[in-house]
Amino acid sequence: CEKGGQWQQAFALFDSLPELRLAPDGIGCNALISACGRGGQWEYALALLQSLGRLRPERTVLSFNAAISACGKGGQWQPALVLLHSMPQMQFLPDVVTCSAAISACGKG
């Protein structure tokens, strides 16, 4: 679902996890954020990132990278930079991938 940009199907699968008695993990959540980005749904990607701050699994640098990339794919450089600059306040250090995604977002905005 992620690679094909099938974000609706990714959400459906994610929503069905409790019925299967499965709990979402960080890998699945990050894949869902990426699927939203590939599908041009940067707003959903940001909402998912925000919800990971309140739920388990917790967000990781990979979560931020996926959300920043989603913003870039949506031509939204400003939210991408807001995320980048907010990471240290939330105890996350941007890595090379984070910075590359933010630079790419600026180039597309």
Image (cartoon, rainbow, N blue to C red):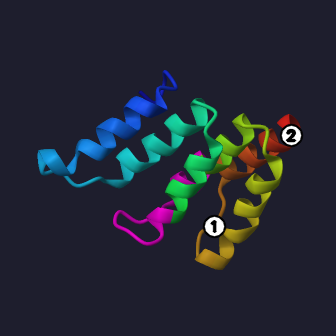
Tell me if mark 1 has few (under 14), some (14-19) or many (20+) residues whose alpha carbon lies within 10 angstroms of its own: some
User: Could you tell me if the residues under marks 2 and 1 are in contact, i.e. CB atoms within 8 Å?
Assistant: no
Identity of the amino acid at label 1? Answer: Leu
Tag 2 secondary structure: loop
Q: To which residue does mark 2 refer?
A: 109
Q: Image height check: is 48 above or below 2?
A: below
Quadrant showing the C terminus:
top right
Closest to the observer, 65 or 47: 47
- Percent coordinates x, y for residue 70 in the rendering: 64, 41
Tag 1 secondary structure: loop
Q: Image height check: is 6 above or below 16?
A: above
Identity of the amino acid at label 2? Answer: Gly
- Percent coordinates x, y for residue 50 in the rendering: 54, 64
Closest to the observer, 42 or 86: 42
Which span is picked out in magenta? Answer: 51-66
- Residue 9: which disc? none
Instruction: Residue at 56%, 48% (x, y): give it.
Output: 44
- Percent coordinates x, y for residue 71 in the rendering: 70, 45
The image quarter in which residue 32 lies = top left
**Sequence-first disc among 2 and 1:** 1
Q: To which residue does mark 1 refer?
A: 93
- Percent coordinates x, y for residue 72 in the rendering: 74, 40
- In this picture, residue 93 sits left or right of residue 32: right
Q: Is 70 part of what is drawn in magenta?
A: no
